[in-house]
Image: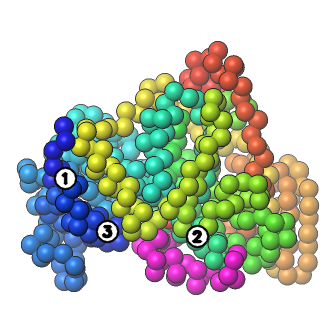
Amino acid sequence: MNTTKKIGLIGFGVVGEGVFKVISSNKDLKVQIEKIAIKNPSKKRDAPAELFTTDVNDILLDSRIDTIVELIDDDEAAYFIVKQALIHKKNVVTANKKMLAIHLSELIQLQKANKVSLLYEAAVCGSIPILRNLEEYYNNDLLQSIYGIVNGSTNYILTQMTEKNVCYQQALQQAQLEGFAESNPTLDVEGFDAQNKLVLLLKHTFGIKALPTQIIRKGICSISSEDLQYAKEKEFQIKLIAKAYFNQLGYVVAYVMPQFIDKESPLCTIRNEYNGILIESTLADQQFLSGKGAGRYPTTSAVLSDISALQYGYQYEYKKASNVNTPTVRQNEIIEVYVSWKGQTAIDSALFIEIDTYFKSKEFCFLTGKINLATMDSLIACQKFSVVEMPFRPLQKVAPEILLEKNVYEPLLMDS
Ligand code: HSE
């Protein structure tokens, strides 16, 4: 059914205004914006005044409006609006990864019960069509890992620091000015945004229902110029990486952490606000998707793609979820890291299973070694330590024959 979608737009910020501009300048889209809900009526906006309302009920209770496009940064307000919209049998397109990561299960139920669609391609990796690909294209192939740069702001900051010697604060300010960063940039730099996106990726890649708090997270705030220098000497780049993979025991491991990326990896070429995702599947092997992960128009492109998909009644089906016995994400995994610190701070070497290198000077110290991911938490909690995972070693793939013989997801994921 290809009818004109009547949209209630919630929010007129960086992306909301982008969506409005593109829709109002393209009459072929079969999309009409009926109303726009905003918080502050006194702000000057480049759109007809009669479209704006400060009462979200003017949209939720308007029976002409069949679709809500929710683009605000307040996750609690967004949750209320999206929930009400689904209850009022309106489709929802949203980019609010934090709200989705916390409330996804409930919202999926509401979508089903009310026979409408909840789409959120713009919530993960901006313009890269990752979620619909995971849902549709990779539906017949068992995915073994998903691994990538999912936050544009941190990649922008690290690129500017590495290539232009810009200091952290200045690079962050620039990311804010460009409209890449969240209103509260702590969400970006401390890895919360990547953690929320990884929750959504876990759902669409493996059918795993996780909460953000179950995923170990380390951001980029403590990366120092010495760490960048170390990376340069080794010809590595530092990137904030979100990853989820089957380990050799058949458990899914997922975490967010800065990582050294070597020249051979396609992720090494991903600069500034670009994102990149490596997908490893049992049959197709490795594939790589990249594109702009933040910013007004790249995000608008994903929102518009969802609106177009609504015109043929598209819904995520969450087919993988039905095979999975709600496993937990495992933190019992040994990883290899570089940890650095300055001054008198003492590191507890007993935390490490093995130490490979230990460098100590008056000003700066680092070590490299193996540590259990769960043990990492105490180091992560202490901002004095900078943690970077050592370069990615290709995972030993679980052989297709082994997986084909099994009822793939369920037996592999049951926690013993
Ligand atoms: N702040 C986010 C980022 C916006 O930098 O990736 C896009 O989700």
Q: Residue 272 carries which label?
A: 2
Label 2 CA crowd tier, 10 Å (few <14, some 14–19, many 20+): many
Q: Which amino acid does label 3 sit on?
A: Gly
- Determine the residue positioned at 40% across, 61% down: 299
Q: Which amino acid does label 2 sit on?
A: Asn
Q: Is mark 1 on a helix, strand or loop?
A: loop
Q: In which quarter of the image is residue 238?
A: bottom right
Ligand 1 has an atom within 8 Å of the beta carbon of the residue at disc 1: no
Q: What residue type is labelled 1?
A: Lys
User: Disc 3 to disc 2, how far (Cα)?
Assistant: 21 Å
Label 1 CA crowd tier, 10 Å (few <14, some 14–19, many 20+): some
Q: Compared with residue 6, is residue 365 higher up or lower down, i.e. above or below?
A: below
Q: Position of residue 59 (x, y in %)?
A: 14, 58
Q: Which of the marked residues, 1 or 3, is nearer the chain's N terminus? A: 3
Magenta range: 162-186
Q: Nearer the viewer, mark 1 or mark 2?
A: 1
Say which of 360 and 51 sits in front.
51
In this figure, which residue is indicated by the disc labeled 1? 30
In this figure, which residue is indicated by the disc labeled 3? 18
User: Disc 1 to disc 3, how far (Cα)?
Assistant: 17 Å
Q: In which quarter of the image is the N terminus?
A: top left
Does the image show residue 283? yes
Q: Quadrant of residue 398?
A: top right
Q: Position of residue 82 (x, y in %)?
A: 26, 52
Q: Which of the marked residues, 1 or 2, is nearer the chain's N terminus? A: 1
Q: Which of marks 1 and 3 is in front?
A: 1
